[in-house]
Image (cartoon, grey):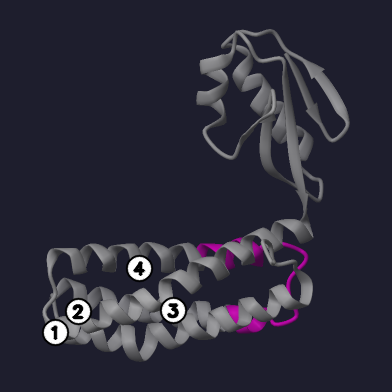
Amino acid sequence: MQLNILGSNYEFTNELSSIDLVLNKIVENLDGTDFYLSHLLIDGVELFSDFDSYIAEYIEYIQEIRVEVLTIKEFLNEIFSSAEEYLLRALPEVEILTNEFYQNSSGHTWEKLQLLLEGLQWLNQMILTVDQEKLKPDNWNQYIEYSAKLAVELKNLEEGIINQDNILIADIIQYEINPLMCNLKDEITSTIDAIGVRKNIT
């Protein structure tokens, strides 16, 4: 099978022992460049994760693995677009979640809170990832400020969760976390309008 990356071609045998060699070659070629892995195109099939599992399953038949890359600007645009999409979906749900904690929380309410926490941790991780990059938006200081505030409120929220204090949880979400999420959404929208491209615009 052939690996095509950044205009270079490499030949590998169609054996399980080649999987690590292929994945290591991809890392080796991208390391130190301004390109980021977008996805693999394996005989025309787009793959965004679980590369080793897929390659292992079809190892006997694979002819070509093409590595699709993103420039740093495209990479940032992907990250910010994903964050904007998440916040647009999450904000209406946050309002519903707050009302449930004020009224009468159920097991389902606590499950939704867990999903919110995972989403907020993902947003913080996104900010940390971009902070490592050379290219950052002009409004980057705002992101750092919101990230720091979010970390504080997540700590406060943890206290409410430990004590199962529904009113404290609802207050923190409504008066602290929800406004932060709104502000972050506005910053992200501003960033995409300034340096990015919004997909699926009709």
* Residue 156 drawn at (x, y percent): 29, 81
Q: Is residue 130 magenta?
A: yes
Please report the bounds of the magenta region as a residue range.
Answer: 125-143
Q: Is residue 53 above or below residue 37?
A: above
Q: Which residue is mark 3?
A: 150
Left or right for 44, reference 135: left
The amino acid type of the residue labelled 1 equals Gln
The amino acid type of the residue labelled 4 equals Leu
The residue at 74%/34% (across/down) is 67
Secondary structure beneath label 3: helix
Secondary structure beneath label 2: helix
Q: Which residue is mark 1?
A: 103
Q: Residue placed farthest to the right in the image?
A: 7
Residue 8 position by quadrant: top right
Q: Are marks 2 and 1 in contact (CB under 8 Å)?
A: yes
Q: Which residue is mark 2?
A: 100
Q: Which of disc 4 and disc 2 is earlier in sequence?
A: 2
Q: Which of disc 1 and disc 3 is earlier in sequence?
A: 1
Secondary structure beneath label 1: helix
Say which of marks 2 and 3 sits in front.
2
Q: Is residue 57 above or below residue 170?
A: above
The amino acid type of the residue labelled 3 equals Leu
